[in-house]
Image (tube, helix red, strand yellow):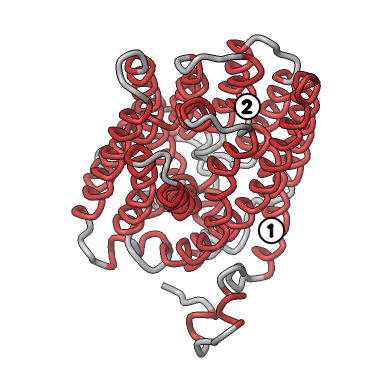
């Protein structure tokens, strides 16, 4: 593994240590230029995400959506995850950027359409369409990360991007939820304005993404399209081939447990804070998004840089521990402010690391550079889709029989069980993670 400049240099102290926690790694020239466009895309996309994140609250407070109906966008996202298995195979021997830019532009258009929907069913269906398109671009992400950036710092790069994204997301979701709070009688007009603004921001973001190079300073093998042969096989067969890898099968099985536990309760979080606890737009947004985003900005870079030096099993074990602690604490003491804050801080510690592992670099530990990267990612997202389809349906059925607190409790237990399974799967051997630098 090629060390970074910061790893070879004498350890700085004081203020330099603090600065380094918020700075990207030292990059070669092409990757450095790409990082600028990548950062612009990431920040604009975070403005978009901050607005769209308030869509469930918009549906609850302005359109009186039921708890069961809030599961619709989560279940619809499974369609995008299922499609990922096919798009992953389709893009395996082709340039990856069109497979991000085209769905991205469609996502911007779907958001603009949401602005004019007044029925909670159609509004949440529009949010579900945004989720479908968002997940459809995911198989290309680890390949693009692998071909643009050197292997010794890919997780650090992704962590830095997500670190600053969390800060912009914080400002976006807080500011636009504040506008919703002020609107009162004119809430419909404000929702229309915010979603229109989000659609325009998303459009500009994907224009920036289109400026990324087709080849950077990363894996040359990843960048070379190889037509013929395997690309004529059925996508389902290509996906099944990935499960011949024993380590990958174990990884996907534990990931499935994690997603099932998470998807059991995540659709109820807006209703839990706004209905069960009686919070308004701003207080709900503060706890749902703002506190986790601040924590993610503070610790995200440090955590993700550690991923470059350890195994994927240890990385996921730590992240899922923080992730599962959040719903468990909320279920145990929802009215105790110190406990609620600790729960959301735990969520913030997991946020950046989870995104980096799930969509940027985690798959590098199993797939060789080249067509395998997007095929393996498509298979992982397919299983994610199965979990996201099953768990919300079970939750929708349980809402009439169990309280939201109990659903949070069971979901948290499931996530913590996945954390333990990830840890038990770790061999501690360097060869488990050195493939990610290839």
Residue 421 vs 133, above or below: the answer is below
- Write down the residue under mark 1: 34
Residue under the image location 37 percent in, 49 percent down: 367
Q: Quadrant of the C terminus?
A: bottom left
Q: Is residue 413 left or right of residue 350?
A: left
The residue closer to the viewer here, 326 or 238, is 326
Q: How many C-alpha atoms fall within 10 Å of the one at disc 2: few (<14), some, or many (≥20)? A: many
**SS for tag 2?**
helix
Residue 173 rendering spot, x and y as whole percentages: 66, 40
* Image point (51%, 60%), residue name: 300
Q: Nearer the viewer, mark 2 or mark 1?
A: 2
Q: Secondary structure at mark 1?
A: helix
**Marks 2 and 1 close (CB-CB < 8 Å):** no
Q: Is residue 100 visible?
A: yes
Q: Position of residue 129 (x, y in %)?
A: 59, 21
- Residue lying at the far front in this picture: please name it: 336
Q: Earlier in the sequence, mark 2 or mark 1?
A: 1
Quarter of the image with the N terminus is bottom left
Question: Which percent across, then down, holds residue 154?
Answer: 51, 61
| Alpha carbon distance from label 2 to label 1 | 32 Å
Tell me if residue 239 can be seen: no
Label drawn at residue 55? 2
In this picture, is 333 found above or below 385?
A: below
Q: Position of residue 188 (x, y in %)?
A: 76, 18
């Amino acid at each position: 593994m090629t060390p970074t400049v910061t790893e070879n240099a004498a350890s700085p102290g004081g203020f330099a240590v603090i600065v380094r926690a918020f700075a990207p790694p030292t990059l070669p020239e092409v990757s450095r230029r790409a990082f600028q466009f990548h950062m612009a895309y990431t920040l604009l996309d975070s403005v978009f995400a901050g607005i769209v994140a308030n869509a469930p609250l918009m549906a609850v407070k302005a359109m009186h959506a039921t708890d069961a109906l809030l599961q619709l966008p989560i279940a619809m996202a499974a369609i995008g995850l299922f499609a990922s298995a096919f798009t992953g195979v389709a893009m395996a021997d082709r340039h990856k950027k069109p497979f991000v830019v085209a769905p991205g532009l469609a996502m911007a258009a779907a958001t603009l359409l949401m602005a004019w929907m007044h029925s909670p069913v159609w509004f949440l269906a529009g949010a579900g369409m945004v989720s479908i398109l968002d997940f459809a671009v995911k198989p290309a992400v680890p390949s693009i990360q692998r071909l643009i950036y050197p292997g010794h710092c890919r997780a650090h790069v992704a962590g830095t991007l997500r670190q600053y994204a969390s800060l912009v997301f914080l400002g976006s979701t807080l500011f636009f939820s504040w506008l919703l709070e002020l609107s009162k009688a004119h809430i419909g007009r404000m929702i229309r304005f915010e979603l229109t603004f989000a659609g325009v921001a998303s459009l500009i973001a994907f224009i920036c993404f289109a400026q990324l190079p087709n080849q950077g300073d990363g894996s040359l093998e990843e960048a070379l399209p190889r037509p013929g042969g395997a690309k004529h096989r059925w996508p389902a067969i290509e996906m099944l081939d990935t499960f011949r890898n024993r380590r990958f099968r174990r990884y996907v099985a534990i990931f499935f447990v994690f997603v099932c536990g998470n998807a059991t309760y995540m659709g109820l979080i807006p209703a839990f804070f706004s209905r069960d606890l009686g919070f308004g737009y701003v207080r709900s947004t503060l706890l749902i998004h703002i506190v986790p985003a601040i924590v993610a900005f503070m610790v995200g870079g440090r955590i993700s840089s550690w991923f470059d030096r350890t195994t994927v099993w240890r990385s996921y074990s730590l992240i899922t521990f923080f992730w599962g602690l959040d719903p468990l604490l909320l279920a145990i003491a929802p009215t105790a402010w110190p406990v609620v804050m600790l729960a959301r801080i735990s969520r913030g510690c997991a946020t950046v690391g989870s995104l980096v592992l799930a969509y940027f670099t985690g798959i590098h530990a199993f797939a060789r550079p080249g067509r395998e990267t997007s095929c393996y990612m498509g298979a992982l997202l397919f299983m994610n889709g199965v979990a996201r389809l099953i768990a919300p349906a079970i939750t929708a059925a349980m809402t009439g029989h169990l309280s939201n607190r109990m659903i949070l409790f069971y979901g948290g237990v499931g996530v913590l069980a996945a954390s333990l399974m990830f840890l038990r799967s770790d061999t501690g051997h360097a060869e488990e993670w050195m493939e990610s630098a290839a």
